Image (tube, rainbow, N blue to C red):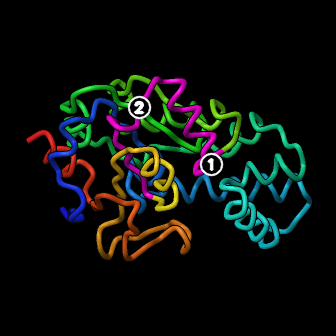
Amino acid sequence: MTISVPIKRALSHFAQVETWVFDLDNTLYPPHSDLWPKIDARITAYMAAMLGLDGLSARALQKHYYRAFGTTLSGLIHEYQVDPADFLRFVHDIDRSSLDPNPALAAAIAALPGRKLILTNGSHAHALATAKQLGIDHLFDDCFAIEHGDYLPKPHLQTYQRFFDRHAVDPARAAMFEDIVHNLEVPHASGMLTVLVKPKEGAEDFREDWEKHEVAPPHVDFVTDDLAGFLAGLVR
């Protein structure tokens, strides 16, 4: 397990955490899993069929929207007023059987004191199905999915504010676990402890190049490549 603890923070800060917030994709399951590539491919297929584009053109536009708007869906809503429910049903209709249950992660999350919430740019149905496949769905009190933020994704400030309000979260007594650096900026500025979950060294990583950071910026309090081990260490 790799843990980086910046001087400005110590593990003892987690003693005051009463709400534990987890991103879903590439955080609760590792980035070398094939789940995200499956979703990614279905997004490309959706755009190709909808816009009459070849695969390469659809994928290029998909990645442009993703970076410019935070999600491809946000770009499609902005440019084409696409039906978000239809889009989410299609892109999250994947086989999750390749994702193994994670008993170590389940035990570590179960041992945490306080509430556990999922905050994801994916759909509510996708979050529940994926958490169930991991064997951790019963451990979470609730899930704030993209539809609960009116399809405005992280890292928008308004989305986090809606999340805080909906679940009565006190950021000063909460921690956020996330695989994308810029999605931790608002949580940190709001007073949350922030933990960047990264792949193990040498492991396959299907995220976009701009989502990967070798050096954690100041708004990241901790870095780990072993979420279950990190959480278990906090409880110990």
Which percent across, then down, holds residue 133?
A: 40, 37
Looking at this rendering, what residue extends furthest in the left direction?
Answer: 236
Q: For the residue labelled by badge 1, is the local secondary structure a helix, a strand or a loop?
A: loop
Q: Determine if the magenta segment contains residue 178.
A: yes
The mark found on residue 146 in the picture is none
Q: For the residue labelled by badge 2, is the local secondary structure a helix, a strand or a loop?
A: strand
> On screen, 228 above or below 218?
above
Residue under pointer 2: 117
The quarter of the picture where the C terminus appears is: top left
Can residue 132 be spotted in the picture?
A: no
Name the side, left or right, on which 154 lies relative to 143. right
Identify the residue shown where x is 46% and y is 62%: 181
Which percent across, then down, holds residue 177?
A: 37, 48
**Residue type beneath disc 2:** Leu
Which percent across, then down, holds residue 193?
A: 33, 47
Q: Determine if the magenta segment contains residue 90.
A: no
Q: Could you say which quadrant of the image residue 3 lies in?
A: bottom left
Q: Nearer the viewer, residue 56 or 164?
A: 164
Q: Report the magenta residues as a range.
A: 153-179
**Residue type beneath disc 1:** His
Residue under pointer 1: 156
Name the side, left or right, on which 197 lies relative to 73. left
